[in-house]
């Protein structure tokens, strides 16, 4: 069986905070964020806008990448997002 795993970055509408996560079902996870069903940081800071994601076939690689992205500075996260989404549109409206 072939699975996809995703590392993603969501933000609030103002782009003032970022949250980086990993999931095996991107649409479901972003829907949970948008509906406020996940308690914690994303709900508190209203992070509902998908700005960035990467796809992996191996969960271990996805987890390692998530850790690396989380450690990036704000400037480097901005550069990462700008490479695929310079207009900062919600990738899953």
Image: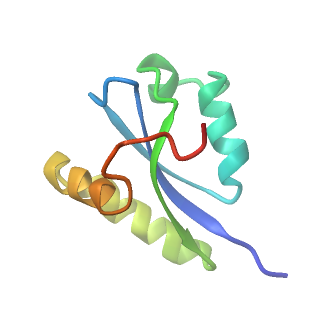
Q: How many marks?
A: 0
How far across and how far down the image is residue 75, in percent?
14, 50
Image vertical order of residue 5 relative to residue 50, above or below: below
Viewport quadrant of the C terminus = top right
Residue sitting at x 46%, y 28%: 47
How far across and how far down the image is residue 12, in percent?
40, 27
Left or right of 25? Residue 78 is: left
Left or right of 48? Residue 18 is: left
Residue sitting at x 18%, y 46%: 74
Farthest residue to the top: give it. 44
Left or right of 74? Residue 29 is: right
Figure coloring: rainbow
**Towards the viewer: 55 or 65:** 55
Quadrant in the rendering for residue 64: bottom left
How far across and how far down the image is residue 11, in percent?
40, 34
Farthest residue to the right: give it. 1
Residue sitting at x 61%, y 28%: 34
Residue sitting at x 67%, y 24%: 37
């Amino acid at each position: 069986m072939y699975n996809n795993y995703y590392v993603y970055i969501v933000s609030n509408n103002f782009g003032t905070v970022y949250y980086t996560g990993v999931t095996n079902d991107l649409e479901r996870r972003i829907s949970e964020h948008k509906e406020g069903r996940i308690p914690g940081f994303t709900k508190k800071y209203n992070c509902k806008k998908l700005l960035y994601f990467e796809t992996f076939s191996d969960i271990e690689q996805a987890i390692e990448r998530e850790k690396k992205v989380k450690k990036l500075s704000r400037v480097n996260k901005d550069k990462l997002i700008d490479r695929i989404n310079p207009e900062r549109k919600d990738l899953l409206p």
